[in-house]
Image: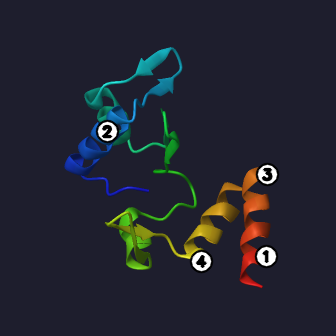
Amino acid sequence: MVAPDPENLKRLAEVAVEARGHVQTGESFLSTSFSIAAELASGKRVAIETELGLLDVVQGLDGVPSYDELRSSAVETEILDVVVFICSFDDLRRMKRAAGRPRDSVDLEDLDAADQ
């Protein structure tokens, strides 16, 4: 989940391109920061394949709270001298339950096991 303001989406797209990122949408192959930012601005879930792995930007899905809601209960931490906010376990569990995919069920079991 990312802040949905246009400048932030532009920055994210630029970082994705630096990591040799692209988005496959049907027949289209998006690989410029402009095209990736435009796809992000659609408000849909966007899967960006990069040389570092998949960057799954979750937006506009049922059961996913808004960025502001998630940010209000997020945990602040520092990774490689960069401050990042990570959604709370409660919010993560709620989103996993809403998605309901087999992978999410496994993730929920792992989260429960980690809490014990």
Residue ID at (28%, 38%): 14
Identify the residue under disc 4. 90
- C-beta proximity under 8 Å, tags 4 and 2: no
Q: Which residue is mark 3?
A: 102
SS of the residue under disc 2: helix
The alpha-carbon separation of the residues under discs 2 and 3 comes to 29 Å
User: Between marks 1 and 3, how big is the CA–CA gap?
Assistant: 17 Å
Tell me if label 1 and label 2 are in contact, CB under 8 Å: no
Residue picked out by circle 1: 113
Residue 69 in the figure: left or right of residue 9: right
Q: Is residue 6 visible?
A: yes
Disc ID at residue 13: 2
Q: Residue at x 49, y 70 (%)?
A: 87
Is 6 drawn above or below residue 73 in the view shown?
Answer: above
- Which three-letter amino acid code belongs to the residue tagged 1? Ala
Q: Contact (CB < 8 A) between labels 4 and 3?
A: no
Considering only order in the chain, which callout, 2 or 1, is on the residue closer to the N terminus? 2
Q: Is residue 23 above or below residue 14?
A: above
Q: Secondary structure at mark 4?
A: helix
Q: Amino acid at mark 4?
A: Asp
Q: Nearer the viewer, residue 80 or 59?
A: 80
Please, what is the three-letter code of the amino acid marked with disc 2?
Answer: Ala
* 33 sits left or right of 85 in the view: left
Q: Name the residue nearer the viewer: 69 or 10.
A: 10
Alpha carbon distance from label 1 to label 2: 35 Å
Mark 4–mark 3 Cα distance, whole angstroms, equals: 19 Å
What secondary structure is found at the residue carrying circle 1?
A: helix
First reached walking from the N terminus: tag 2 or tag 3: 2
Q: CA distance from mark 4 to mark 2?
A: 29 Å
